[in-house]
Amino acid sequence: MTNKNKAREDIIEAASRLFRLHGYHGVGLKEILKESGTAKGSLYHYFPEGKVELAIAAIEHTKEFVFKSTLVSLKGIENPVQAFQTHISHLAEEFSKDSILGMPVGTIACETYLTNEAIRLACKAAFEDWQSLYIEKLLAANYSEKQAKDLALVINAMIEGGIILCLTNKTGEPLHTIARQIPLLLKKEIE
């Protein structure tokens, strides 16, 4: 990676971390610059549209990180019940660490859905990409396309809600509880 690309990546990583921790409105460009260790000119060189453009890049960065880690988590286990339980339990374990920084894009989504369409669409794309992995796993287990799409949305909503409860309760137990309920959710109905 060249120094130019490193500076851009440092800014994006700092913004991603700070937006997850403090939300979009709770972070200023000065804090992002300080956290990234880059000059003000670099920020505007890479993100001439300012904070909104940077937020979208941060959301895309987080989306890719979560997508890759979810893909690895789900790919290693053929049985969808076991795969989702393992995936959700792994997320729950993150809450036992002191370094958890909040929801991947939920904070920004909640703050900006009415005020910034570009950021709302970036968050929507992140959720849809993550759900696509769930759909793929369920289709491979012979769920119908409609079942796979519906269940993927429910699983994603449970995870996002579980993350909020984990943050509020300062424990991963809500996600562990969700993981234990996955067998009931994925029980195939006779059509």
Image (spheres, rainbow, N blue to C red):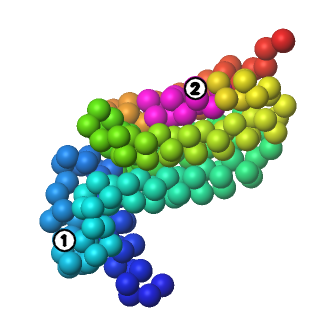
Disc 1 secondary structure class: helix
x 75%, y 34%: residue = 138
Dot 2 surroundings within 10 Å: few (below 14), some, or many (20 or more)? some
Q: Which amino acid lies under the numbered mark 1 shown in the image of this protein? A: Lys
Q: Residue furthest top?
A: 191
Measured along the vertical axis of the image, is residue 8 above or below residue 98? below
For the C terminus, the quadrant is: top right
Q: Can residue 89 be seen by looking at this rendering?
A: no
| Main secondary structure found in the magenta portion | helix
Q: Which residue is mark 1?
A: 34
Give the image location of residue 109, x and y in percent: 36, 39
Disc 2 secondary structure class: helix
Give the image location of residue 4, x and y in percent: 37, 84
Q: Which amino acid lies under the numbered mark 2 shown in the image of this protein? A: Val
Does label 1 or label 2 sit earlier along the sequence? 1
- Confirm whether the magenta stretch covers residue 175: no
Give the image location of residue 99, x and y in percent: 35, 56
Looking at the image, which is closer to me, 58 or 36? 58
- Region of the chain picked out in magenta, as a range: 151-162
